Image: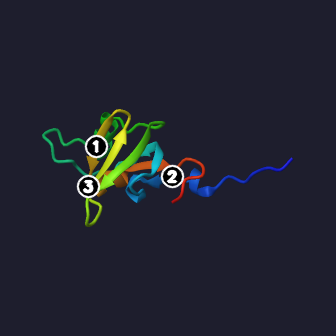
Amino acid sequence: MISRVPDPLTILPVSLSTLRKGETAVVVGVRDDHLDVGDEVRSALARRLLELGFIPGEALTVIGAIWPGDDPIAVRLGRSMFALRQREAAAVMVTRPAGALP
């Protein structure tokens, strides 16, 4: 029996901000950068992203990015679409499905 060595790119989480248009991934977590979003209650960025639905296990697709600078990017999460700034996208950690190109 031949055992297959898993591709490290499909195992190691990467930031959502590194994905390009058309790529799909699964959320594995949200990093807290301890910076405020700027609203009245001064919620942390990670909490806001979790409230929007960026929870572990959710599949997402990068729909598009604004040129130049890819800021913001459009992300489809379930039936919703969100525009995320690079700082926000960098806080979302994802894994690519097996066979996906980096």
Label located before the other in sequence (3 or 1): 3
Quadrant of the image occupied by residue 30: top left
Alpha-carbon neighbours of circle 1 within 10 Å: few (<14), some, or many (≥20)?
A: some
Question: Which three-letter amino acid code belongs to the residue tagged 2?
Answer: Pro
Q: Nearer the viewer, residue 17 or 79?
A: 79
Where's residue 45, x and y in %?
28, 46
Instruction: Tell me which label, 2 or 1, sits earlier in the chain.
Output: 2
Q: Residue drawn 40% across and 57% down?
A: 20
Few, some or many C-alpha atoms within 10 Å of disc 2 (few <14, some 14-19, many ≥20)?
Answer: some
Q: Secondary structure at mark 1?
A: strand
Please give left or right for residue 89 compared with residue 19 in the image.
Answer: left
Residue type indicated by callout 1: Phe
Q: Earlier in the sequence, mark 3 or mark 2?
A: 2
Residue underneath mark 1:
82
Q: Tell me: 102 left or right of 37.
A: right
Residue 43, above or below 79? below
Q: Secondary structure at mark 3?
A: loop
Farthest bottom residue? Answer: 68
Kindly identify which residue carries mark 3: 72
* Position of residue 38 in the picture relative to residue 9 (left or right): left
> What is the residue that sits farthest to the left in this orientation?
40
As drawn, 46 above or below 65: above
Q: Which x, y percent locates residue 6? A: 68, 52
| Of residues 51 and 99, the one drawn nearer to the viewer in this rendering | 99
* Mark whose residue sits in front, 3 or 2: 3
Q: Nearer the viewer, residue 13 or 2?
A: 2
Residue found 58% across the figure and 52% down from its top: 10
Name the residue beneath numbered marker 2: 13
Residue found 35% across the figure and 41% down from its top:
76
Q: Inspect this view and state whether residue 16 appears.
A: yes
Q: CA distance from mark 3 to mark 1?
A: 10 Å
Please, which colouring scheme is shown?
A: rainbow
